[in-house]
Image (tube, rainbow, N blue to C red):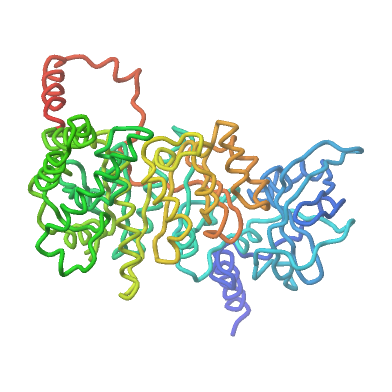
Amino acid sequence: MSEQSNLNEFLSELKSYAEGDGPGGAHEAPQVEQAPIGHVAEIAGSSSAILIDAARLHELADEEDPALRLSGQVGSQVKMSVGKNWLIANVRTMRAGESGKVIANVDFLGEGNRESDGRLSGFKRGVTRFPIPGAEVYPVTTRDLRSVFAADSRPHIEIGTVYPTDDIRGALYVDPMLGKHFAVLGSTGTGKSTSVSLILHRICDASPEGHIVMIDPHGEYSAAFKNHGEIFNVDNLQLPYWLMNFEEHCEVLLTSEDSERQRDEDILAKCLLEARSRNKMADQFGKVTVDSPIPYLLTDLNQILVNEMGKLDRAGDATPYKRIKNKLDELRADPRFTFMFSGMMVSDTMGKFIAKMFRLPANGRPISIVDVSGVPSEVTSTVVSVLARMVFDYAIWSRTETLRPILLVCEEAHRYVPKETDVGKGQAVRRILERIAKEGRKYGVSLGLITQRPSDLAEGVLSQCGTILSMRLNNERDQDMVRAAMPEGARGFLDAIPALRNREVIVCGEGVNIPIRVSFDNLEAEKRPASSDPSFAEMWRDVGDEEGIISRVVKRWRGHGK
């Protein structure tokens, strides 16, 4: 073989390696070992202090590698050599020290193997051995972070790019995230709805035969999932009134308070039990209770109330019966409640309702969007309560069958699970969502909470969420609430919450290996929710057809959307 051919072969191999075809793939060329940027000053468990040379930080600012450029700054990572391991830590705070030094508090994230060429591999959360004071601190590279943040073989979805890199993908592990619940938090205008849509779309793409029920209080998500799920609203929801349990019946039918309410509850319990027992199929169900989801006629309940009134000796004793009867008549006559109190709902449609609502089978459309924006405010909490309880009860009573896990996603969760100080009407929905948060994972029910006001959310519920995705929060009380719910090792990330850009998120907990900051991917226009902010400057320039607009709006208004 000639010298020229040997030279050409060598150049070809060199070019192939540079383009990423050699061992390690793209961006894996031999890496120049960086000089230390400081040393360990204090060790205090998960949180410690290091001294950084400010001059070295200025030198790193000119590096091409984005991870190197930011290494050593707040929210970034540094590494320390401990034996045969690299220890990765997150920089939480920085302050000026003496003689050009910077004092930084760091939180240890985990450790990985230190290879012979200095590479980091096999990263795992947690620390088995801490460095000693004086140990050198090094900047991290994108290659290091790829080993730290790269997803393993477990089922996962990719949602964006990990900060501060350009190409490392941020992943959520599906089973740990759903198995122990999750919460998405963020102030209005941070891109929360679009980000939630992206997460759910990725889950649906990964599991097209899944089972997801989403409560949508503003009608935003119908546009995002019109081609990937079933949309339910007051026009097609057809939620039978007899699916309500006794507590939900009380919330809808009783208007009294204090001591009068207890008497009204006793009356309603007696009459409701008799109405359910009149069903011809009641005998085959065994023992019938006021909570049994057995169809009954509203006319039967009305007649039983009238009969009970006829047995009274004094006219004044009939007042509670009249209150319940008047409320029942009002619901039957009001067209706004047709989706729930129609006379056509007496047939036993429970099986069909469950199959349709829980996507059993999904047929490639695994999500049900329940738009409750058109539901009268008096019964919104009750409707959500019935749906949430149906999810939980189905999971309990299907334990002997093949498991079909269900994800219940609740937008504006602070409406339904408020703090104790905000307790009022709507206790049924609060109780069932709290129960799902505490016990749901035992039965294959996952809860996804979405809220812009975590400080208004019951603390016990948020603390049950194993994975928390926090976007920018402007309110200090909200920030404190998230800080209390997140693990201690994530404190360095939490301090960045007020400074996050739109569609950036801090993810902590079971769904990720370690806390990460991620910039969400862009979502296709047809998959976005109808939640974009209007442009006042642009739309206030439009004129024309005002009379036609008003006429059509008034017609829909009076016809309740029809």
Q: Position of residue 456 (x, y in %)?
A: 50, 36
Say left or right for 136 vs 88: right
Camera-side residue of 342 and 282:
282
**Visible residue check, residue 24:** yes
Where in the figure is residue 246, as x and y percent of width and height?
28, 49
**Image position, residue 342 (x, y; %):** 11, 44
The C terminus is located in which quarter?
Answer: top left
| Residue furthest out toward the bottom | 1
Location of residue 10 (image quadrant): bottom right
Residue at the image point whose x is 59% and y is 70% from the top: 24
Q: Which residue is found at the position 72% from the left and 72% from the top?
A: 115
The answer to which of 388 and 1 lies nearer the viewer is 388
* Between 479 and 227, the one nearer to me in the picture: 479
- Residue 486 at what x, y percent from top left? 60, 49
Q: Is residue 189 above or below residue 526?
A: above
Give the residue furthest to the front. 313
**From the image, which quarter does the N terminus lie in?**
bottom right
The number of discs equals 0
Horizontally, is 78 left or right of 143 in the view? right
Instruction: Please determine whether, in this image, residue 256 is positioned above or below residue 345.
Output: above
Kindly tell me whether residue 193 is visible in this rendering: no
Give the residue drawn at x 58%, y 61%. 513
- Is residue 353 rendered to the left or right of residue 4? left
Q: Is residue 263 left or right of residue 444?
A: left
In the displayed structure, would residue 282 be above or below residue 307? below
Identify the residue at the far right of this view. Answer: 99
